[in-house]
Image (spheres, grey):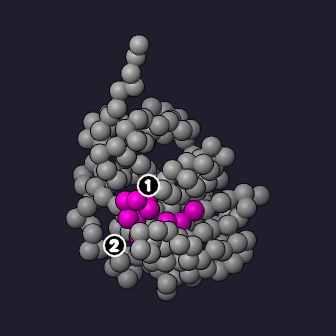
Amino acid sequence: MSSMMKMTSKQYLVLGPDPPGIHLELAHGEIYMSPSPSPDHSDIILALAGFLRPHIKQHKLGKLYADTDTVFDDENTRRPDVIFFASARLHLVGKKALMGPPDLCVEVLSPTSVEMDREDKFALYENRRVANYWIVDPDAQVIEAYVLKAGKFELAVRGKGHDVVRLPPFPELAIALAEIWPES
């Protein structure tokens, strides 16, 4: 009779780099493996960062990170595709990991991650009080921006195709979605 051994976020952070071709996260105290992101997935992340990073730097709003261990609690260390910490919360940025809920998490859906991103991470980010959560669906060419209100995520903005959107927490930034989707 064997029992599943749970792991803490502290133990997880000692593991070191992921094995080649595998993306590790700690979910509910258990190691979760997924394949490395596809080229299109990576392209979307870089395109989004290309809009966000200059805006964040120019207005001194905080810092942007990608695919970095983010400790949400003792049993959950996740790696959102794009992560933003506002200036007032940069003290949560550690040497090895981001130590608390970001001001924005962005997840780009892939065929293997839809359920995880729309259900599991949605609930985790909501429960851990992430102020903003964007879900990017490359197949449908849709971006959804959720804002935490009274402890629950509410859909604030939904953009599609070639829309130009302004997504919280960056109301001054116009993002041309046509520039985010990979060319087919």
Image quadrant where residue 46 sits: bottom right
| N-terminal label among 1 and 2 | 2
**Relative side of 88 to 68, left or right:** left
**Residue at the image position 72 percent from the left and 75 percent from the top:** 162
Q: Amino acid at mark 1?
A: Leu
165 vs 120: above or below: below
Viewer can see residue 147: yes
Q: Residue at x 28, y 48 (%)?
A: 96
Pick whichever, 55 or 84, lies toward us: 84
Q: Nearer the viewer, residue 118 or 142?
A: 118
Q: In what quadrant of the picture does the N terminus appear?
A: top left
Q: Is residue 131 magenta?
A: yes
Residue 83, magenta (yes or no): no
Mark 2 surroundings within 10 Å by alpha-carbon count, few (fewer than 14), some (14 through 19), many (20 or more)? some
Q: Is residue 76 above or below residue 94?
A: above
What x and y, as percent, mark residue 48? 55, 67
Q: Which mark is residue 182?
A: none
Badge 1 density bin: few <14, some 14–19, many ≥20, Cα 10 Å: some
| Residue 86's disc number | 2
Task: Give, as a three-letter code, the residue at label 2.
Answer: Ala
Snapshot quadrant of residue 55: bottom left
Bounds of the magenta span? 124-135
The image quarter containing residue 90 is bottom left
- Residue 124 is labelled as 1
Q: Quadrant of the C terminus?
A: bottom right
Residue 59, horizontal then vertical, whole percent: 37, 83
Residue 66 appearing in the image:
no
Identify the residue at image location x=41%, y=74%. Answer: 150
Residue in view at x 30 percent, y 58 percent: 100
Q: Position of residue 94 (x, y in %)?
A: 24, 55
